[in-house]
């Protein structure tokens, strides 16, 4: 009778791990992702870097400051209408047509680079939160499965003790169970330490209290990759934030090349001079002419960039940087495709392991039932019972590990596609 109860207990333990509450678990994780996006200080720093870079565009798209000068003649310059005593000059420099727009485009494209860096950091944060959540789920399930396994072993221990007292079994059976329980309790203590450490990491990602309770589903839902592998690769090339960042960086260097060419063109300056004149000592001048101030308008100047080596070097620098970005993008595409191939392999491996350990668990439970019957009737096979019990525990843990690995692979795929 007790053996049947143990068997039912094991079946319920494994079946319990197959119950799905998909919607609830995904909603919980989605809420954690929102919390992380709102609270994570590293992500906030990336966003503020983007906002700061945006301000550069308005700085470079304005004319140079007007120049104001005041001059006082220590020795007044005598003129027909009187001595010139002081002069005020105001001038404005105008860059060549299109130069300010090109400089603004450089700043805007650099701001877009920073924005994609922010989006990349957000995608990475989402992945880190998800992977830590899945690991917490696995450790929590391992703790529960291990505790229930200890309860089963204690039931075996009581059964073995009864048989030993009745003279139907060796006292070694009881000692073997005690050794097994001690080993599993040690693993349980390690699991609890791992869970606490992982909790601190997870809550720090969300920037909340380190000891906040984390809500986990009873059974992890199953995420799936799209069946069209090429579609995922195309999505990576189109939407990956690292690649988008390089595209905007390329645009910024093209604008920088144009700005460099515009810098090598003349600048035009327009100014006004106003001269203060004192009263003339010439008695033949009328009162309206004596001491009349002089306004000279306009004063036009032009800067001629004669030294071309500097400007040619600026253009060449921008062209070379474009080639650098192009090579970096090709290298990054190759790396991302390699990463996806590994993730695709891990996803398929996890799916196979899930099917395998579901079957292995069923077979192990059947074998356990047969061994229990033999032990009750013939007092044989006790060591085999312990060995099979270890396999039931292993398969239960491996099933949860496969489920966790599958979701982790899907999460990394989402990160690669910029989600």
Image: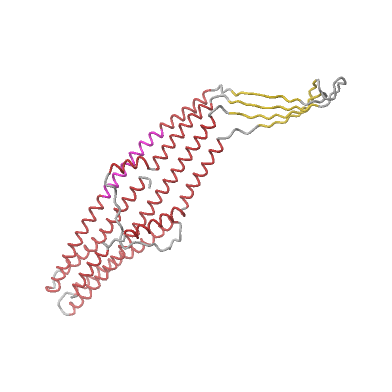
Q: Residue at x 54, y 39 (%)?
A: 56
Q: Quadrant of residue 205?
A: bottom left
Most prominent secondary structure in the magenta stretch? Answer: helix
Q: Closer to the camera, 163 or 264?
A: 264
Q: Residue at x 33, y 61 (%)?
A: 139
- Left or right: residue 195 versus residue 163 is right
Residue 23 image position (x, y, % from top left): 33, 58
- Check residue 79 for magenta coloring: no
Residue 269 image position (x, y, % from top left): 62, 26
- Left or right: residue 230 versus residue 265 is left
Q: Pick out the residue farthest to the bottom.
A: 166
- Examine the rendered structure and indicate whether residue 328 appears above or below residue 49: above
Q: Closer to the camera, 35 or 361?
A: 35
Q: Pick out the residue farthest to the left.
A: 378
Q: Residue at x 30, y 57 (%)?
A: 221
Q: Closer to the camera, 363 or 29?
A: 29
- Check residue 338 for magenta coloring: yes
Q: Quadrant of residue 164?
A: bottom left
Q: Residue at x 71, y 24 (%)?
A: 296
**Colouring style:** secondary structure
Tell me the quarter of the image containing the N terminus: bottom left
Residue 3 image position (x, y, % from top left): 18, 73
- Left or right: residue 394 versus residue 295 is left
Residue 282 image position (x, y, % from top left): 86, 21
Mark count: 0
Q: Closer to the camera, 272 or 153?
A: 272
Q: Give, as a single range, the part of the protein colored magenta.
A: 324-347
- Left or right: residue 324 versus residue 108 is left
């Amino acid at each position: 009778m007790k053996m049947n109860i143990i068997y039912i207990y094991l079946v319920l333990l494994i079946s319990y791990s197959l119950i799905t509450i998909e919607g609830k678990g995904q909603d919980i994780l989605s809420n954690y992702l929102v919390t992380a996006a709102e609270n994570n200080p590293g992500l906030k720093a990336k966003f503020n870097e983007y906002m700061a870079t945006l301000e550069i565009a308005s700085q470079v798209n304005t004319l140079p400051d007007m120049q104001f000068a005041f001059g006082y003649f220590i020795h007044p310059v005598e003129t027909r209408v009187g001595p010139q005593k002081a002069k005020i000059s105001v001038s404005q420099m105008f860059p060549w047509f299109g130069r300010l727009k090109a400089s603004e485009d450089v700043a805007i494209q650099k701001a877009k680079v920073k924005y994609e860096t922010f989006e990349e950091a957000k995608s990475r944060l989402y992945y880190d939160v998800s992977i830590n959540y899945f690991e917490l789920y696995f450790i929590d399930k391992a703790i529960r499965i291990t505790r229930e396994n200890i309860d089963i072993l204690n039931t075996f221990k009581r059964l073995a003790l009864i048989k030993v007292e009745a003279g139907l079994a060796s006292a070694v059976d009881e000692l073997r169970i005690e050794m097994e329980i001690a080993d599993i309790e040690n693993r349980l203590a390690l699991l609890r330490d791992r869970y606490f450490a992982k909790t601190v990491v997870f809550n720090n990602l969300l920037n909340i209290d380190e000891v906040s309770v984390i809500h986990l589903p009873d059974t992890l839902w199953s995420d799936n990759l799209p069946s069209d592998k090429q579609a995922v690769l195309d999505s990576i090339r189109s939407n990956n934030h690292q690649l988008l960042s390089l595209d905007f960086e390329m645009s910024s260097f093209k604008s920088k090349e144009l700005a460099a060419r515009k810098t090598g063109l003349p600048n035009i300056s327009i100014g006004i001079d106003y001269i203060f004149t004192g009263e003339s000592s010439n008695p033949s001048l009328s009162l309206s002419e004596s001491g009349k101030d002089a306004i000279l308008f306009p004063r036009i100047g032009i800067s001629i960039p004669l030294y071309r080596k500097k400007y040619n070097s600026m253009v060449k620098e921008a062209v070379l940087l474009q080639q650098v970005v192009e090579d970096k993008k090709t290298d990054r595409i190759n790396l991302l495709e390699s990463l996806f191939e590994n993730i695709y392999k891990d996803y398929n491996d996890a799916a196979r392991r899930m099917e395998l350990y579901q079957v292995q668990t069923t077979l192990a439970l059947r074998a356990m039932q047969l061994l229990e019957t033999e032990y009750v009737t013939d007092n044989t096979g006790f060591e085999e019972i312990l060995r099979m019990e270890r396999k039931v525990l292993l398969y239960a843990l491996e099933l949860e590990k496969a489920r966790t690995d599958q979701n982790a692979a899907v999460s990394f795929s989402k990160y690669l596609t910029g989600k």
